[in-house]
Amino acid sequence: MAADSRTGTGPRDRFRAQVRQEVKTAALRQLAEGGPEALSLNAIAKQLGMTGPALYRYFANRDSLLTDLVVDAYGDLASSLARAAETGPADPAARLTGLVHAYRAWALAEPHRYRLLFRAPLQGYDAQAATLVEASQPAMAALLDAVSALAEPDPRAPGGAAAQFREWRERHGFEGVPEAVAARSTLLWAHLHGMVGLEIEGNFASMGVDPSYLYEAEVADFARSL
Amino acid sequence: MAADSRTGTGPRDRFRAQVRQEVKTAALRQLAEGGPEALSLNAIAKQLGMTGPALYRYFANRDSLLTDLVVDAYGDLASSLARAAETGPADPAARLTGLVHAYRAWALAEPHRYRLLFRAPLQGYDAQAATLVEASQPAMAALLDAVSALAEPDPRAPGGAAAQFREWRERHGFEGVPEAVAARSTLLWAHLHGMVGLEIEGNFASMGVDPSYLYEAEVADFARSL
DNA sequence: TGTACATCAGTGAACGCGCGTTCACTGATGTAC
DNA sequence: TGTACATCAGTGAACGCGCGTTCACTGATGTAC
């Protein structure tokens, strides 16, 4: 056995990695164009000038490809958020605003990927698998960081739920985070998820409303709630 | 032509209405069990002891059945919300709390129907059709009512978006509603949508968190935001 | 540097399945006289 | 009240399609000596 095949850096490995990437790109294009659940292995293969069975050289099956897309998307979202928090202004409030806008911008730019993350398990697909929970941590970490920097949290919050957030914090490596920050961040995440969800499904558009104002109000309210 | 067939109350019409209802019930059961997009005309027919083509006596096609389900669901949600607002305590704040809990309860009881309402158009299905927008109005009206009763809104809000909410209000028969109430209600709706969405997809469960606390915090924050 | 061999990407046929929808039809049901 | 007729629910066959996945295979590519 050659060293390359062990370390995964031989020419064949590079080729494999590249084709895997092309498959994923084609899959995303398909999701983007064909709407949710328009992900067909045969169609992807055709787009790459291959036949369907060839894809099984690169992914064990359809679910495996899907999992890869989800993990990638979480990673991408997390770096978007982290970038917004890092390169933003020093003022913590302004940085949180930047993070909120980054969240929204990411979802609007790639709604199909956003759906992939937060939509129901697509027929029998187990979204609660440990892999996926783990993949979602960096994005949450970015949010927790930004909220932590913002203010001294009210130590009384989150009341009866404090124990749950404490456990959650320990389990996922967020040890330094006060319960109140965890709770507040989770609520903010839920709010953003709701606004972004309505926006990408066209609900605000069908109301004739530009939701930008709502995001502004959201940030203002959040600052006041701490 | 008989009078009955004109007015739609003859024995055949009653039979048709009943079978239509059975078809819808079977469809909902299928959505509930099979996950989203598990709605198959053939499977529904089989469940009713019929063959597939028989359904075309009752619905023009698959989309038509779907539209019916969506309209029904909006109606059901609206009456749930209206009931919560009517039968609740006289205190407006407590009534809003009741409405929030009714919204959550409805979504949790029938997540498949909630998804039907707020999920992306299912492959080419036009969710923005006028029929559906109209069907969603009563639910929104219940929310607007509860928020209206709560407090004198800040007349400065919603800033630059006031004109949009004014137009929206006129277009959908919410003439009496101040812009600030419309904006606040929309934001509250988005928040609820986000929390409920995360909850029915199991995101809180996978965190080990019971979101009840978050709903309480939501209501408290909302009262403070007015 | 050249050759023999192992690896592995990709093919084409096939499996079994389910889908929405159309069509010509049969047979029961309700209705008009 | 009885009979003839129109209505219409439901069937069964068929259309054309696409799906994920398996299998035995060919032929190119990289590798070891």
Image: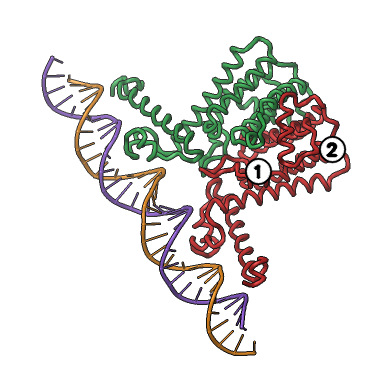
Chain colours: A green, B red, C purple, D orange
Check disc 1 and report the residue beneath it. B133
Residue A119 is left or right of residue A159, and the answer is left
Q: Residue furthest right?
A: B90
Closest to the observer, B40 or A201:
A201
Front position among marks 1 and 2: 1
Whole-percent x and y of residue A41? 40, 39
Check disc 2 and report the residue beneath it. B149
Whole-percent x and y of residue B137? 71, 44
Query: In the rendered view, would you say A127 is above or below A101?
Result: below
Q: Quadrant of the image for the C terminus of chain A?
A: top right
Q: CA distance from mark 1 to mark 2?
A: 24 Å
Whole-percent x and y of residue D28? 22, 28
Which quarter of the picture shows residue C31? bottom right
The disc labelled 1 sits on which kind of residue? Answer: Val
Query: In the rendered view, would you say B60 is above or below A77?
Result: below
Chain ID, mark 1:
B
Residue B55 is left or right of residue B189, and the answer is left
- Near mark 1 (Cα within 10 A), the count class, few <14, some 14-19 or many ≥20, is some
